[in-house]
Amino acid sequence: MKKVAVIMGSDSDLETVSPCMSRLDSFSIPYEVRIISAHRTPEQAAEFADQAAGQGFGVLIAAAGKAAHLAGILAAHTTLPVIGIPIKTSMMGGLDSLLSVVQMPKGVPVACVAVDGADNAAILAAQILALEDPKLSEELVRFKADQTSQILEKDRAVREQYSKLS
């Protein structure tokens, strides 16, 4: 199975990104976690992206806040899918990060999940990898069915507790 790179621009992003690693673990997807800054270590970002496919990666996940250019710099240097996680910031609540990730120029696509959407980034990475992995595809089908069951059970419980029918 191909592995996933989980890259953050700063160690301050680790708490926000940790649900991504937990979800990857739940799908038994191998991953490597790195801190690489688009602005403070741009050569290392380019080098990592250039070599990622040859190192066995299938998807790159990039988490960054403020001027969140990490996903874009990685996408500029690889043909692998790149998923951006915009990190919530104190200045604009993450809108600045979100716009930095989604406003990519033509020819340099980056997929983007919600602000602080690390769990969804992992699920999207799993869906991408599942295109070539039938076992992972089956795991995702079970995951979706479990989500449905959980919501139906919560619906049943709330209806029993709060519905007042005459």
Image (spheres, grey):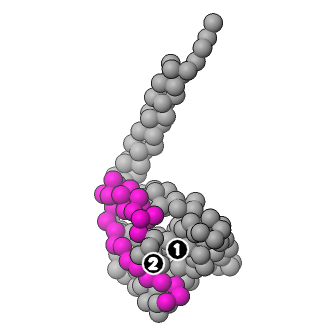
Type of amino acid at the residue the image marks with label 2: Ser
Which residue is situated farthest in the front direction here? 90
| Front position in the image: 49 or 153 | 153
Task: Establish if 41 lies above or below 146.
Answer: below
Q: Residues within 10 Å of mark 1 (few under 14, many from 20)?
A: many
The quarter of the rendered structure image containing the N terminus is bottom left
Q: Are marks 2 and 1 in contact (CB under 8 Å)?
A: yes
138, above or below 67, in the image: above
Locate residue 62, reporting x and y percent.
49, 73
On screen, residue 122 versus residue 2, left or right, reads right
Residue at 37%, 48% in the rendered image: 139
Identity, as a three-letter code, of the amino acid under mark 1: Ala
Residue at figure coordinates x 41%, y 45% from the top left = 143
Image x and y of residue 15, in percent:
41, 65
Q: Give the range drawn in magenta.
A: 14-40
On the question of residue 102 being in view, the answer is no
Check residue 10 in the rendering and tell me which mark sits there, or answer none. 2
Residue 108 percent across, percent down from the top left: 61, 78
Query: In the image shown, does 148 or 7 lie closer to the viewer?
Result: 7
**What residue is shown with label 1?**
64
Q: Residues within 10 Å of mark 2 (few under 14, many from 20)?
A: some
Task: Give the mark nearest the N terminus, 2 or 1.
Answer: 2
From the viewer's perspective, is 109 left or right of 129?
right
Q: Which mark is residue 129?
A: none
SS for dot 2: loop
Circle 1 sits in a helix, a strand or a loop, which is it? strand
Label 2, label 1: how far apart the Cα atoms are = 7 Å
Asked which quadrant contains residue 73, the reply is bottom right
In the rendered image, which quarter contains the C terminus?
A: top right
Q: Is residue 139 visible?
A: yes
